[in-house]
Amino acid sequence: MTTEVKDVLNWLDGLCEQALTEARGGNAVFANRIGGNSSLKLYMDNVHGIKTVSREQFAAYYPAQMKECTSLYEAYLRDEQANTHETRLAVLEGKLDTLSSMLTTFIEAQQPADKKKPDDKKKPEAGDGKGEGEA
């Protein structure tokens, strides 16, 4: 059995265990969602329910359903990876905002308090007589 098949079977076992645990606690929504997919339902019924086959036998006896379960597992991994990237991006954006505000605070603290901002300086007017040639 390949590593990929073992990973898929472990994922399926995790789904089924989670669904059964929630159902025992009174919340059967996840179990019902698993029952809505024929391949997941077949796995849950035959491996965890009536236990007619082992998980390894399921992979061997039901190749079409195993292929669909593998596709679902791969989609799950893609979703998890996308969520991880979004989370990392949000964390990095937060850190960048913090660094930006710290840098602004630092720059403002380095400027003397009595120094005027560059926008406040008066510009010499054209007709004030400064810089014009003497006649």
Image (cartoon, rainbow, N blue to C red):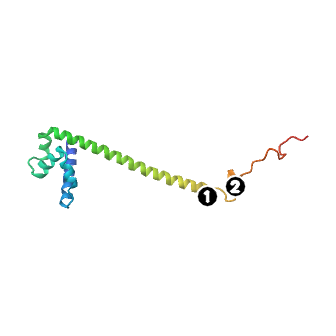
Decide which of 92, 30 is in the foreground and name it: 30
**SS under mark 2:** loop
Left or right: 52 with respect to 102? left
Is residue 116 toward the left or the right of residue 57 in the image?
right
Label 2: how many Cα within 10 Å (few below 14, some 14–19, many 20+) = few
User: Residue 112 lies in what quarter of the image?
Assistant: bottom right
Q: Which amino acid does label 1 sit on?
A: Ala
| Mark positioned earlier in the residue sequence (1 or 2) | 1
The residue positioned 44% from the left and 50% from the top of the image is: 92
Q: Which residue lies furthest to the bottom in this view?
A: 25
Residue 38: image location, x then y, percent: 17, 44
- Front in this rendered view, residue 82 or 39: 39
Q: Name the residue under label 1.
A: 109
- At which x and y percent is residue 72? 24, 43
Q: Residue furthest right?
A: 135
Q: Mark 2 points at which residue?
A: 116
Residue name at image x 13 percent, y 51 percent: 48
> Could you tell me how far apart the alpha carbons at marks 1 and 2 are, in whole angstroms?
14 Å
SS state under label 1: helix
